[in-house]
């Protein structure tokens, strides 16, 4: 009979078993950090949240006005087709044509409950237990959590600090086996902020195509890249190899609406809809209406916020790199900084916990982004205003 110890230390007994794959999956990291924050003494300095990568600004008033009127329409409370309303998928294709010069049709689009659901649809459509998926370190923590829960083996491409964590095609090709189903990349990287250059992405695309495996590309933060992120969607048969996971939650400050998307071959979309129907049925209609408005009307608003996040990033980097700071910047991009901490022999989890309790800084430990990364911390700029940046850096210097 399984024995389980709860968070309160109470021993309980169950007459059923739990999926053993889940035992190897670490708990949600952000929840753990929030628990550390609750342990701070009374009267401590206000928290500075460099933990969760969400925009701190609201959606634009015109979008809120649009959906506030829509809630009175009885249709807004009903299901949509599993893949999403045709007009919203068409709006996504128009946006991709403007952003990527994409050759994309609505049958290559599935609207999902956040990028997390899009990733699950891609993963379960491509893999089953015992398969392998190549993951570039450092990686977004939800990805290996999902792989391990399904019994898919993550095969890690090593992190190279000098190259800011950029993938190396030769290294990745050497990891491919008969069990490999896909190469998984995130650009801009979460946690480093590093953007994979278009030419390197093209090399990796053709590498995957030669080996008849998928290139799964998570571009959750791509709207925070200046200019066209890459040209893969201009290829006539991009869908023969590329599977894109996308979130518009960051783009339009709709993270709670769970506005995700999967872009892939029509056949993969058809198979993924079987999963979508058993999980969420469809992206909520109210989310789709908000998303459609954003896709059609908010390109300039998104660009203004991209510049603001870039300004925050540049200001932080300038302050952080001034002489005398023992924390060292290893890589960064508009939304993130990847920092090596100075405490030899201590894990990122130990250091992050101390920073939360003693210094009032919330960050994520490096080891949640993959094995061997205990010397690092991830910082996110979504929740920190410009006027708080100097104070945040001062606290790092004092902690060191």
Image (cartoon, rainbow, N blue to C red):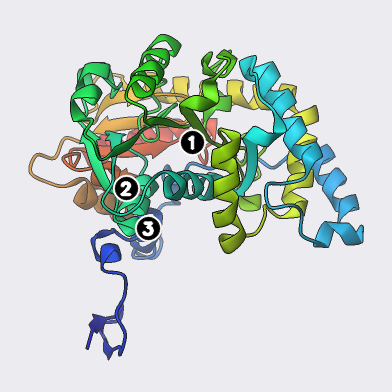
Binning the other alpha carbons within 10 Å of mark 3 as few (below 14), some (14 to 19) or many (20 upward) gives few
Q: Check the image and report above or below for 394 versus 144.
A: above
Picture quadrant where residue 105 is located: top right
Give the mark nearer the N terminus: 2 vs 1. 2
Could you say whether the residue bearing mark 2 is in a helix, strand or loop? Answer: helix
Q: Check the image and report above or below for 160 versus 243.
A: above
Q: Which mark is residue 215?
A: none
Q: Classify residue 314 as left or right of residue 290.
A: left
Binning the other alpha carbons within 10 Å of mark 1 as few (below 14), some (14 to 19) or many (20 upward) gives few
| Separation of residues labelled 1 and 3 (CA atoms) | 27 Å
Which of these two is toward me, 25 or 322? Answer: 25
The image position of residue 323, as x and y in percent, is 25, 19
Residue at the spot 70% in from the left edge and 17% down from the top edge: 98
Q: Which residue is mark 1?
A: 388
Could you say whether the residue bearing mark 1 is in a helix, strand or loop? Answer: helix
Tag 2 near tag 3, CB within 8 Å: no
Q: Which residue is mark 2?
A: 144
Q: Which residue is mark 3?
A: 28
| Separation of residues labelled 2 and 1 (CA atoms) | 33 Å
| Separation of residues labelled 2 and 3 (CA atoms) | 12 Å
Q: Classify residue 342 as left or right of residue 270.
A: left
Which of these two is toward me, 63 or 283? Answer: 283
Picture quadrant where residue 293 is located: top right
Q: Quadrant of the C terminus?
A: top left
The image position of residue 391, as x and y in percent, is 41, 36
Could you say whether the residue bearing mark 3 is in a helix, strand or loop? Answer: loop
Tag 1 near tag 3, CB within 8 Å: no
Q: Check the image and report above or below for 43 versus 172.
A: below
């Amino acid at each position: 009979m399984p024995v389980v110890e709860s968070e309160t230390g109470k021993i309980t007994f169950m007459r059923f078993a739990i999926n053993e794959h889940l035992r190897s999956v670490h708990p949600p990291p952000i929840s753990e950090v929030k628990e550390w924050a609750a342990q701070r003494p009374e009267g401590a300095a206000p928290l500075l949240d460099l933990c969760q990568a969400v925009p701190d600004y609201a959606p634009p008033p015109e979008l809120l006005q649009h959906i506030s009127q829509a809630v009175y329409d009885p249709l807004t409370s009903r299901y949509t087709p599993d893949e999403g309303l045709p007009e919203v998928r068409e709006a996504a294709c128009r946006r991709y044509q403007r952003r990527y010069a994409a050759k994309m049709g609505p049958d290559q689009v599935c609207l999902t409950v956040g990028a997390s659901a899009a990733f699950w649809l891609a993963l379960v459509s491509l893999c089953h237990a015992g398969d392998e998926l190549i993951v570039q370190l450092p990686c977004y923590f939800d990805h290996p959590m999902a792989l391990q829960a399904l019994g898919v083996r993550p095969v890690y491409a090593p992190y190279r600090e000098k190259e800011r964590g950029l993938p190396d095609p030769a290294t990745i090709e050497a990891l491919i086996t008969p069990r490999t189903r896909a190469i998984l990349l995130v650009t801009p990287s979460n946690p480093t902020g590093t953007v994979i250059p278009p030419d390197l992405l093209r090399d990796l695309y053709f590498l995957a195509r030669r080996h008849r495996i998928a290139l799964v590309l998570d571009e959750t933060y791509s709207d925070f890249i200046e200019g066209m992120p890459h040209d893969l969607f201009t290829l006539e048969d991009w869908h023969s190899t590329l599977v894109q996971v996308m979130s518009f939650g960051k783009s339009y400050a709709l993270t709670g609406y769970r506005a995700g998307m999967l872009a892939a071959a029509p056949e993969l979309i058809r198979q993924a809809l079987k999963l979508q129907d058993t999980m969420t049925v469809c992206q909520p209609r109210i989310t789709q209406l908000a998303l459609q408005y954003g896709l059609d009307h908010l390109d300039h608003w998104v660009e203004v916020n991209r510049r603001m996040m870039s300004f925050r990033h540049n200001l932080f980097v300038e302050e952080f790199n001034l002489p005398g700071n023992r924390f060292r910047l290893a890589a960064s991009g508009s939304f993130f900084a990847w920092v090596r901490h100075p405490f030899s022999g201590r894990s990122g989890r130990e250091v992050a916990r101390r920073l939360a309790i003693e210094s009032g800084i919330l960050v994520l430990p490096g080891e949640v982004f993959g094995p061997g990364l205990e010397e690092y911390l991830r910082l996110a700029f979504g929740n920190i205003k410009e006027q708080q940046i100097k104070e945040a850096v001062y606290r790092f210097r004092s902690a060191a």
